[in-house]
Image (cartoon, helix red, strand yellow):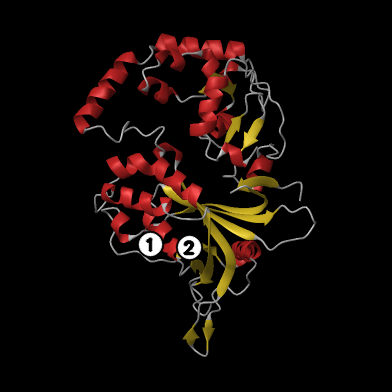
Amino acid sequence: MENFQKIKIAGLEYYIIDSIQNLRAEDSFIYRKNKLEMFKGNGESRKYVGSYTGNNGERLKDFFEYDNWGETEVDGERTYPIIQENCFFSKSNLLKYLYDARIEYQKQEQVYKFDISEFYAEHLNKIDALKEDKIFFSIYDVSDLTKDKKRNRGYIRSDNEIWDLWRKLILPKISYLSILKLIPIVNNGEISKPLFYFRILIDYQFRSIVHPKLSVSSTEIEVIEKEKKIAKRTPSREGAQKYRKNVIEHMPQCPFTKISDERLLIASHIKPYRTCINEDKVEEAIDYLNGLALSPTYDKLFDQGYITFTDKGELICGTQLTPYTWERLSINPNAKNVLRIYPEKREQYLDYHRKYVFQDDINDLI
């Protein structure tokens, strides 16, 4: 078990023994009041989780420990057998999703049928009123029937109120579901039944820290005026080139790949560039201590909050990627290796990254 990544939820530690990541919020599942203008229908409460035939089917069976996908007719009557009873949402995750999505709720870059800003406060109050951090529920098999050879789609559903509630929160196209399969860490050596942690997440580019609408309180005129001011105080091309030069001089190679060829290095901002400009802190946007020299893949991991660093330079990996992906990246998410990022005097920027850019709660992982 020690090889598995750990996570802490509501004060308890778990091993992540498997995960299904990036299950998109397809239009067929979206609650009718959250639908985009381009789509019709009211949506349905069952969620697609993958094909139940072939290699994907074996993967689905292994993950949920359930073999009878789509075999849900008895004497010609449709039944809905329980797949797993130990599933839960986390109040803290649902609140974080709403926080990350708040500007999209208020400003709506996508074109919705309704003004979804009217629902935000209601959603927030309902989640805030939940008494427990872990809200448990059971999932049922509502898949396509096996007798229909042209269809093999695995679907799940729940009758619990939390299922209806999370469905009303999620926004189309920009949201996705992640399911972590967990085993509690216990000292007596007892092997417990797995738990299934359902999380909802939002695409990085729609998270509030990088959302181009700038402020939930701004009028359209204020937004335009603010954009003009931002354009005026944006560092010149020469300033940007000097920033890149200084970052690479201070940190002459990528700590992951050891690449030192400047053509393959990106001067990646720790505190996002746009945030610095939006806060009228141009000096932070061009401060070489607010940058790391990273090769492109690792720049993306850091820029979009899949990894972060402690003030000592220890690498911290989030839980948004599968063990297979970490392996292909040659990263061990359990290892607290100190990488050469020269963290001294970068503490304020690293603290911002851990709090606002990193996609997990740092306190759950260290």
Residue situated in front as seen by the camera: 236 or 191: 191
Q: Is residue 259 left or right of residue 52?
A: right
Q: Is residue 129 left or right of residue 143?
A: left
Q: Earlier in the sequence, mark 1 or mark 2?
A: 1
Above/below status of 209 relative to 230: below
Q: Which residue is mark 2?
A: 48
Q: Which mark is residue 28?
A: 1
The residue at the point 46 percent across, 25 percent down is 272
Quarter occupied by residue 54: bottom right
Q: Secondary structure at mark 2?
A: strand
Quarter occupied by residue 362: top right
Q: Locate residue 335, reporting x and y percent.
A: 72, 36
| Farthest-out residue, bottom | 75
Crowding at dot 2, Cα within 10 Å, few <14 / some 14-19 / many 20+, comes out as some
| Farthest-out residue, right | 189
User: Do labels 1 and 2 touch, CB within 8 Å?
Assistant: yes
Q: Locate residue 44, reporting x and y percent.
A: 38, 66
What's the amino acid at mark 1? Ser
Q: Is residue 160 left or right of residue 109?
A: right
Q: Locate residue 53, reporting x and y percent.
A: 58, 68
| Farthest-out residue, left | 221
Residue situated in front as seen by the camera: 13 or 214: 13
Quarter of the rendering occupied by the C terminus: top right
The residue at the point 65 percent across, 67 percent down is 65
Above/below status of 32 relative to 247: below
Q: Secondary structure at mark 1?
A: helix
Q: Is residue 312 visible?
A: yes
What's the amino acid at mark 2? Tyr
